[in-house]
Image (tube, rainbow, N blue to C red):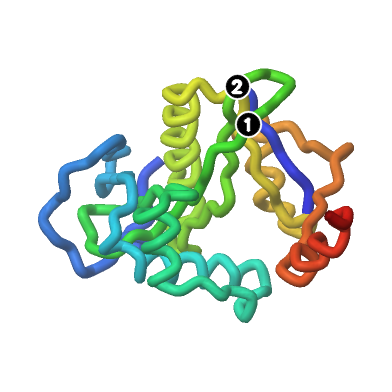
Amino acid sequence: MFTLSCFFSSLDSNCTPHNVKQPRQLLSFNHTRNGPAIEIRAARPEDVDDILQLIIDLATYEKEPDSVKATPELLRKNLFETPYAHALLLFVGGAAKPVGLALYFFNYSTWTGRPGLYLEDLYVSPECRGQGLGKALFAELGRIAQEKNCARLDWAVLKWNQPSIDFYEKSLAATPMSEWVGMRLEEDGIENLKKMAPPP
């Protein structure tokens, strides 16, 4: 996995879900693109089941389906009650079920003295790929980043995921941050940190 950073067609008919409701009022983005309307809006508490399913679908694509420990209750708490992160959902043709997800949060850059936007998850259902939906999600993320005066937008991609890497570099002009190595402590490691505290 390495980090990328970004400084500031018609839809396939198979992509359109069948359970169509009346078009919803959009918060941010609506574009027809000579086909079914693309709708992007901020997620709502009632969307947690759909969000979780898209997270599971992404984990399955990344060959880690058993790694998802999130639940609807955790998502409701951490996205809405105490919003540590935010989610965008993408719908096609006024359908009830989303086919795309962007989950993000804000961080801070000491070098720029400004906030940044970190994209934790980006996912578009396989039957809808190649139709510009990923670009549409990034366009909305870019709008949010500018609105919040973010200096940069960062995300990570698995090293084996060459199609995504090519898309990010060629279509978005994103810069691979290959000189950085990601580091992580999970729960056991965080617990062990307490042992490093000096005695009182």
Q: Residue at x 68, y 19 (%)?
A: 112
In this rendered view, identify the residue nearer to me: 66 or 33: 66
Q: Residues within 10 Å of mark 2 (few under 14, many from 20)?
A: some
Mark sitting earlier along the chain (2/1): 1
Residue 48 lies in quadrant: bottom left
Q: CA distance from mark 2 to mark 1?
A: 6 Å
Q: Residues within 10 Å of mark 1 (few under 14, many from 20)?
A: some
Residue 20 appears in the picture as rendered: yes
Q: Give x and y (percent) for residue 177.
A: 80, 37
Q: Give x and y (percent) for residue 41.
A: 31, 45
- Quadrant where the N terminus is found in the figure: bottom right
Q: Residue at x 44, y 68 (%)?
A: 74
Q: Secondary structure at mark 1?
A: strand
In this rendered view, identify the residue nearer to me: 57 or 46: 46
In this rendered view, identify the residue nearer to me: 150 or 98: 150
In the rendered view, tell whether residue 42 sits above or below residue 185: above
Tell me the residue that label 2 is attached to: 114
Q: Give x and y (percent) for residue 200.
A: 83, 54
Residue 96 lies in quadrant: bottom left
Residue 131 appears in the picture as rendered: no
Tell me the residue that label 1 is attached to: 108
Identified by mark 1, the residue type is Tyr
Identified by mark 2, the residue type is Arg
Q: Residue at x 69, y 48 (%)?
A: 156
Q: Residue at x 38, y 59 (%)?
A: 99
In the rendered view, tell whether residue 61 sits above or below residue 11: below
Looking at the rendered structure, the number of numbered marks drawn on it comes to 2
Disc 2 to disc 1: CB gap under 8 Å? yes
